[in-house]
Amino acid sequence: MRVAVTLAMLLSTGSGCANNPERLPELDRRFYYNLDSARDQEQFLDLRDEDRQAFLERKGLWSKWIALPEAERTAVGDGNVEIGFHEFATFMAWGPPADSQTRDPDGRAVRQHTFIRCTSGPKAGRFVRANLDCDGTSSEILVTIRDGKVAEINYPH
C-alpha cells in the first residue's frame, strides 16, 4: 500500500501540477496572479503544464498576452512598466493592483491603480496586495491609465 501511495505522489508531481504558485514557471505564475477568482487559481494549479495555455485561452488572458507588443512582453519578464504600455502589461509585470479607482476628469474616464512594492524584508522587490504582506517596509506606485495605456507612473513617497 505504501508503495502505491508513494508512486501516486511521484506521478502527480511529475505531471506538471503545482500545489504552490511560487513553484510555477515565471510566466505561468504571472498569469496565476491575474486570474479572476480563487477557484480559477486553484484549477490552474491543478493543471498539467501543457494544459495551462488552453485554460488561459478560455479565460481570455492568453489573447491579451499575445496582443501585447513584443517589447512589452519582454519588459514584463523583467518586471518593468513604462509609459505607453498597455494596462494588461502592468498587471502581468506587477500583479493585480492593491486598489483601483475610476475617475472622470474633464469628461474622460481615467483609472488609477495603486501597486504596493516591498522595499525591505523577505519579500523585498515583490509586489503584494497589502502593505502587511511585506513583512518589512513598502512603497506605493500610482499608475494612471488612459485609453487602455499607462499615461503616468508616480512614486509618491
Image (cartoon, grey):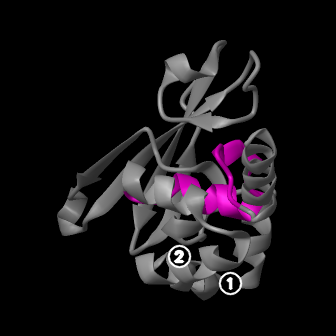
In the rendered image, which quarter is residue 123 located in? top right
- Above or below residue 87? Residue 71 is below
Determine crowd level at label 1: few under 14, some 14-19, many 20+ residues with C-alpha closer than 10 A: few
- Above or below residue 146? Residue 111 is above
- Above or below residue 67? Residue 108 is above
Q: Is residue 78 visible?
A: yes
Q: Secondary structure at mark 2?
A: helix
Q: Are marks 2 and 1 in contact (CB under 8 Å)?
A: no
Q: What's under tag 2, amino acid-wise?
A: Leu
Is residue 18 within the magenta segment?
A: yes
- Residue bearing mark 2: 56
In the rendered image, which quarter is residue 49 located in? bottom right
Q: Nearer the viewer, residue 11 or 92?
A: 11
Q: Position of residue 95 (x, y in %)?
A: 56, 50
Drawn side of residue 155 relative to residue 74, left or right: left
Real-space Cα separation, disc 2 to disc 1, in angstroms: 18 Å
Q: Position of residue 100 (x, y in %)?
A: 34, 47
Q: Position of residue 112 (x, y in %)?
A: 38, 50
Q: Earlier in the sequence, mark 2 or mark 1?
A: 2
Q: What's under tag 1, amino acid-wise?
A: Pro
Q: Nearer the viewer, residue 12 or 102?
A: 12
Q: Residue at x 72, y 57 (%)?
A: 12
Q: Quadrant of the N terminus?
A: top right
Is residue 112 within the magenta segment?
A: no
Write the start and end of the magenta stretch as one range. Answer: 17-36
- Residue bearing mark 1: 69
Q: Nearer the viewer, residue 45 or 7?
A: 7
Q: Residue at x 54, y 30 (%)?
A: 156
Q: Residue at x 62, y 49 (%)?
A: 94
Q: Nearer the viewer, mark 2 or mark 1?
A: 2
Q: Secondary structure at mark 1?
A: loop
